[in-house]
Each structure stands twice: as structure tokens, then as C-alpha cells.
Amino acid sequence: MEAPTPRSRDMTARWLFLFLLGVAGSAVLQVHGQADSLGFISIDCGLPGKTGYIDSTTKLSYATDAGFTNTGTNHNISAEYVTPTTGKIWRSVRSFPDGLRNCYTLRSLVPGLKYLIRALFKHGNYDGRLNRWPIFDIHIGVNYWQTVNITDGDMPVIAEIITVISGDSVQVCLVNTGSGTPFISSLELRPLKNKLYPQSDMSQALVLATRANVGASANLRYPDDPHDRIWISLNVPSWMAISTTKEVQNSVIDFFEVPSTVTQTGVTSINSSTPIIFFWDVTSAKDSMPGYVFMLYMAELQHLPSNALRQFYVKLNDKPWDTKPRGLKYLETTVLYNEKPDYASQQYIFSLEATTNSTLPPILNALEIFSVVPTTGLATTTHEISAMTTIRDMYQMKKNWMGDPCAPKNFAWNGLHCGYAVSRPPTITGLNLSSSGLSGNISSSFASLKGLQYLGFVR
Ligand SMILES: *[C@@H]1O[C@H](CO)[C@@H](O)[C@H](O)[C@H]1NC(C)=O
Ligand SMILES: *[C@@H]1O[C@H](CO)[C@@H](O)[C@H](O)[C@H]1NC(C)=O
Ligand SMILES: *[C@@H]1O[C@H](CO)[C@@H](O)[C@H](O)[C@H]1NC(C)=O
Ligand SMILES: *[C@@H]1O[C@H](CO)[C@@H](O)[C@H](O)[C@H]1NC(C)=O
Ligand SMILES: *[C@@H]1O[C@H](CO)[C@@H](O)[C@H](O)[C@H]1NC(C)=O
Ligand SMILES: *[C@@H]1O[C@H](CO)[C@@H](O)[C@H](O)[C@H]1NC(C)=O
């Protein structure tokens, strides 16, 4: 533990020591009723005022970002990027020209529960600087989530993470990496059951690369998917779309709860001697070779005569991915997935190939691809964060005091000294407010900072 020592112990130098404050901390995070009856939090970032609205397509209730963040500025996207079909969430953004890290705090969560958290970005030339698209990072709590690379004013970027939240709140932070001003259009949180997506646990999260509703004519989300995953329709000219109006069941042990409306459509290849082939190229700014997990959803949608057989191998990079040839059940989804992330390759080429006995081509109904990110970065303890938040709000300290006070280390708040020990949360050991021109009463929250060894003020 590092413990910086004050330069002067002379009270005329206006150092105040914590032991003078014999009062118990009373800092409590203000808890708002942020979630709706489904436990969903939906924020339309950059919307002015405090009044939200009901989204016309999902019928979900969107809030303004008042109460979720206290930095940044509101903007409308440029008129040339607005058409009558442009959804309301895309029309405004909040941008963060100041500070390295700016955060949204999502509260009233269930500690230990798994959540899907989604950030949406559509630039729309909101700043009137055409063709200057930013690149920035987003963090989930104290952990890197992904790099947001805006390459176009119109094309929305969707960042989604499936992660276990250990506390009763989580921060989503936008981090300026020196390549333009971070901004955000919308932020959404959806609770999941902990059994879903078993590859996501306390130590790693799943970052969405792609989620395809294969053979579908339109994208789907809530209410078709009760978990409000966004399934993007995927059609390839050489694939033949097939569909059913009948309900498609999931198996009894179901880790993914794919909706029937997604698996009711699918594709086959043109004939049984032609495989279904698709590939995924690895692109990552932070990690040259992240691990990947894949879910392939397949269901038989045709009632086959007894002399017909649909049977196929699933191969990844020319090696069998599945142990045996696949036969499918009528109107029941089979999910093929890897439990452990695959680090094998820069390119993942999947091939669904009919066996020699098969009279029918392979079938594919949906797929998901995720990269894996570690979530092992340790946050400052909750009571220290609460105390610091209260101190910040009381003294109206805004500059750089966003996100976790001590973590990650290179983002620690200005004027704060933190102690870092292996596999223990960082602790606040010193607070130097000398440069802040503080005035007013001494917050009792200072007493909550148990590791605090000095405290400095100038009046
Ligand atoms: C506290 O901050 C002031 C102003 O930035 C600086 O001069 C001083 O050295 C700092 N004290 C400690 C103990 O870090
Ligand atoms: C965005 O547009 C709305 C209505 O069109 C207006 O009320 C609001 O003030 C605008 N916001 C900004 C930041 O210009
Ligand atoms: C951002 O996207 C562009 C266009 O695809 C690419 O050339 C560039 O390398 C990307 N940058 C980062 C940091 O990912
Ligand atoms: C299957 O389709 C391919 C590509 O269209 C074609 O070359 C091949 O002859 C077809 N095979 C059969 C058995 O119809
Ligand atoms: C193909 O059919 C033959 C004859 O019924 C059978 O012996 C063989 O095991 C089958 N192959 C596969 C891969 O199922
Ligand atoms: C300081 O505390 C006293 C007593 O609690 C209160 O009357 C006064 O308004 C406070 N002053 C400020 C600036 O908060």
C-alpha cells in the first residue's frame, strides 16, 4: 500500500486530518426507480428535460438521461440524417467534449445477476463537422468493454455486452482515447436469468459481434424476444429461405431461449452437395486475438417424408466442430455452441456439409458470435465510492471525478491517492483537495474512508 504523506503538519498550512472527524459516515447513494416493471432501463441520451416517452415500435418506455449522468451536452443530429422513419432514439445524442472518462450510472440492479447492456451510437453529424468520425472506448465498470469505431454518419453502431453485475449498480463509461469526442444515442439494460449464456460469468463477459436472424425478412427485438435482443435479418442470395408458421420449441435444457419467431425462419443451401458457408474475421483494436464463442441455431422446419434425410456435419476451419453428424428434430431447435472460448484463428470459417446419405441440404436458422472480455478488474469498495460520490456532489467537484475513484489505476480521480494490493479492491488512502478551491462544511462522508491517512484543503 502506498501512503502519501502530507508535506506539512502545521495547521496553518490548512491540513485537516481525518481523526478530527469523529462522526460516522452517512453517505448513501441516492436510489432512483430507474427500471420499468420488466426490470428494463431504457435511456434516450441527449433528450432535453426530464420527461421520457413510449417508443412506438417496442412500446418500451424511454427516459431522458437526467439522473443517469451529470456531464456532457445535448445535441440533435443534422437534418440530412433524419428521415420520417428515423426512430426518436437516434435523433438526439449526448456528447462528452470534456474529461477523459464520462459515465452513466445504472442503479437498483440485483447484485450477482446477469444483464444484457447495450449502447447505441448514430453520429448523424451532430457536431456539424462532416466526415470527422470519432473512435473511442467504452468501459463496463472498471473493465474495458469495446472500442467504438464510427465510420459513417448514418450507420448505427450497436455495442452489447452480457455480463454478471456484482453490485447493485453499474457504470457505463465513455473514454476519450484521443481520436475524437465520445457520444452516445441510447443506453439500454435488460436483466437475464443467470443460467442464460453460461460462458458469461463473474470473470468474463460476452461482447456481441453479430446476432443474425437467418432467412428472415425483418429485424426482431422486444416483444418478439422477451429479452429484447436485436436479431438482424441475414439473407445471402445463394441461400434458400425456408419458414414455418408453426411454433418452434426449444429443448428442455435451454441456455439461450431463442424466440420461436427467430427460428421459424431459416435457410438451406441450394442442394445437398452444396454446403452452407459463412465466416467471421477477427477485428479487435485492443486484443489481437480475443477468444470467441459461437451459437448456431438449427431447427427442422419441414415435415419430412420417411424416405428423406437431412443430416450434416458442422465444420470450423475444415475441422469437425461437432462430434457427430447432425440430425434435427421437426420444430425443435438444436443449439451448437462452444463452452470455452476459441482462440484458434484470425478467421473462423464455418461449413455445414450434408453427409453422403443425406437427401436434403443443411439448414441454419440463427447465429450469434461473441468475443470474450475479462471482467476481473477490481472496483473500489461500495462504501468508499458512496462516500466519494457524496463528497463530490457536496463540493460540486465535476472535473474528472467520474467513474470509479481508483480504478483502473490510470483513470483515478485527480487529487485522490489510492492504494492497490493484489486481488483486493483499491482503497482511498489520501485526498488532496488543495487545488480545488473548496469551501463549505466538512462532509461527514470523509469518515467513511477508512483507509484515508490525510486530507488537504485550502480555503
Ligand atoms: C496537493 O495538491 C497541490 C496542488 O495541486 C500540490 O501543490 C501539493 O503538492 C499536493 N499535496 C500532496 C500531498 O500531494
Ligand atoms: C432538438 O430538437 C428539439 C425539437 O426538435 C428541440 O426541442 C431541442 O431544443 C433541440 N435540442 C438541441 C440541443 O438543439
Ligand atoms: C476503424 O474502422 C476503419 C474502417 O473500417 C478501419 O480502417 C480502422 O482501422 C478502424 N480503427 C480502429 C481503431 O479500429
Ligand atoms: C448443386 O448445386 C450446384 C451449384 O448450383 C450445382 O453445380 C450442382 O450440379 C448441383 N448438384 C445437384 C446434385 O443438383
Ligand atoms: C449411411 O447409410 C448407410 C446405409 O444405411 C449406413 O451404413 C451408414 O452408417 C450411413 N452413414 C452415416 C454417416 O450415417
Ligand atoms: C454548514 O452546516 C451548518 C450546520 O449543519 C448549516 O447550518 C450550514 O448551512 C452549512 N453550510 C453550508 C455552506 O453548507
Image (cartoon, helix red, strand yellow):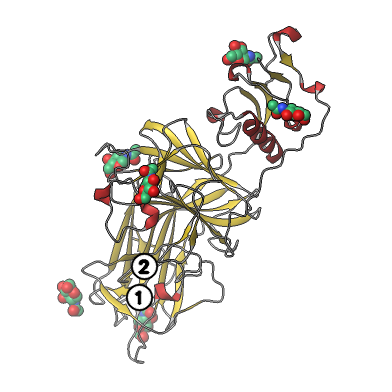
Q: Nearer the viewer, residue 159 or 12?
A: 12
Q: Amino acid at mark 1?
A: Thr
Could you tell me residue 318's position as x and y percent?
Answer: 33, 60
Is the residue under label 2 in contact with that under label 1 (CB below 8 Å)?
yes
Q: Is residue 144 above or below residue 39?
A: above
Q: Nearer the viewer, residue 110 or 74?
A: 74
Could you tell me residue 92's position as x and y percent?
Answer: 38, 48
Residue at 28% of width from left, 38% of height from top? 128
Relative to 112, is 163 on the left or the right? left
Q: Residues within 10 Å of mark 2 (few under 14, many from 20)?
A: many
Q: Which mark is residue 14?
A: none
The image quarter in which residue 387 lies: top right
Relative to 383, is 120 on the left or the right? left
Q: Amino acid at mark 2?
A: Asn
Give the quarter the ligand 4 occupies: bottom left
Q: Earlier in the sequence, mark 1 or mark 2?
A: 2
Residue at numbered disc 2: 213
Determine the CA span between mark 1 and mark 2.
8 Å
Q: Is residue 31 above or below residue 214?
A: above
Relative to 170, is 4 on the left or the right? right
Residue at numbered disc 1: 265
Residue at 32% of width from left, 75% of height from top? 355
Could you tell me residue 229's position as x and y percent?
Answer: 45, 62
Residue 142 in view of the camera: yes
Q: Label 1, secondary structure: give it.
A: strand
Q: Is residue 376 above or below residue 430?
A: below
